[in-house]
Image (cartoon, rainbow, N blue to C red):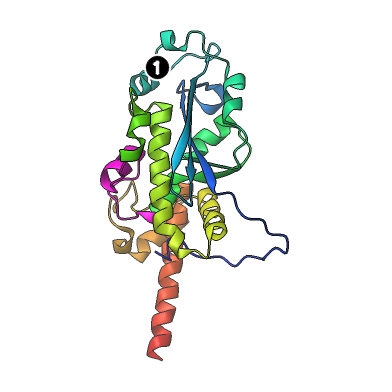
Amino acid sequence: MSDHFPARPATLSLFAEAPPTVIRLIDTETAGQRLEEDAVIEIGSVDLDLVSGQIGNPMQTLCDPAGVPINPHARRVHHISDEMLAGAPPFREAVTRFAGAPLYGAQRAAFDRPRLRLTGRWFCTHKLALRAFPAVQAHGLQSLVKYVPLDLTDVRPMMADLHSHRALYDALCTAVLMRAIAAVLMPRCVDLDDFLQRAERVSNEPALLARFRFGRHKGVPLAQVPNDYLEWLLREPGMDADAFFTAKHHLRLREIRGARAMLAQA
């Protein structure tokens, strides 16, 4: 696990403050267009106390898409109708309810963050789940609920009349996921601040894949992928950033382990 969530040397501050303990897990449903043309049509969030594990303060709102058409595929996923959006506040007004948190988390932060444009430190539970649960079969949100598995018992009352791919429902699942991630990764850290620093760094890096999603070794655990294939990935122009990062990570890790083995034998 230390290979998946490694420590990094940091300069200690003489004026360090206690880190925030509450993270706002947030989810959006959109019109399903490209980022430049998209519209947020629903926002949902809950707050997770990383120390106590308590989840609360549920918030949700629909948003007026301001004339942006809803992609039929997106509508089939979230089932938000035009009738439901009638009278909803504009996004600029609706999003203010969710502002002001020092920490935000989302299952795909690269999707939600640029659409919400909320100021704070952001964490990606998808990338963190790849570090905390690399052996899980799949790392989509509902796959993680099923395969980790995640216990949703304490948040079920807040899920009433909702379903997956509605913003509050997914935010609640994401909060339970973040709680499970912290339970696995935080014991590896010096303290909460160390955990937040490592988690933020991981969230800003490309994803460290558990398996490649293409090619000759598609679906094969990374430990079984040979070096020559990883080296080929690094040479291939236009390679996916996550695959490139993953290949480079595992090659470096194997070099370190090889050097340690040689020292042990010397």
Relative side of 191 to 137, left or right: right
Question: Which range of residues does the magenta coloring cover?
Answer: 132-152
The percent coordinates of residue 257 (x first, y second) are 41, 75
Q: Which residue is depicted at the point 31% across and 45% down?
A: 150
- Does the magenta segment cover residue 145? yes
Q: Which residue is drawn at 52% across and 22% down?
A: 38
Q: Is residue 235 magenta?
A: no
Q: Residue at x 31, y 61 (%)?
A: 225
- Considering every residue shown, the one lying at the far bottom of the view is 266
Q: In which quadrant of the rendered view does residue 155 lie?
A: top left
Between 233 and 96, which is closer to the camera in this rendering? 96
The image quadrant of residue 160 is top left
- Residue positioned 61% across, 26% down in the render: 96
> Dot 1 corresponds to which residue?
80
Query: Is 228 placed left or right of 25 in the picture?
Result: left
Q: In this view, does 36 lie to the left or right of 42?
A: right
- Please tell me whether residue 252 is drawn above or below residue 150 in the rendered image: below
> Which residue occupies the foreground of this view, 245 or 7?
7
Dot 1: element: loop
Q: In which quarter of the image is the N terminus?
A: bottom left
Residue 34: x and y, percent? 50, 26
Q: Where is residue 256 in the image (x, y as percent from the top left)?
A: 45, 74
Q: Where, by quadrant of the figure, is residue 184 drawn? A: bottom left
In the foreground, 189 or 106: 189
The three-letter amino acid code for the residue at tag 1 is Ile
- Where is residue 151 shown, x and y percent of the image? 30, 44
Magenta segment main secondary structure = loop
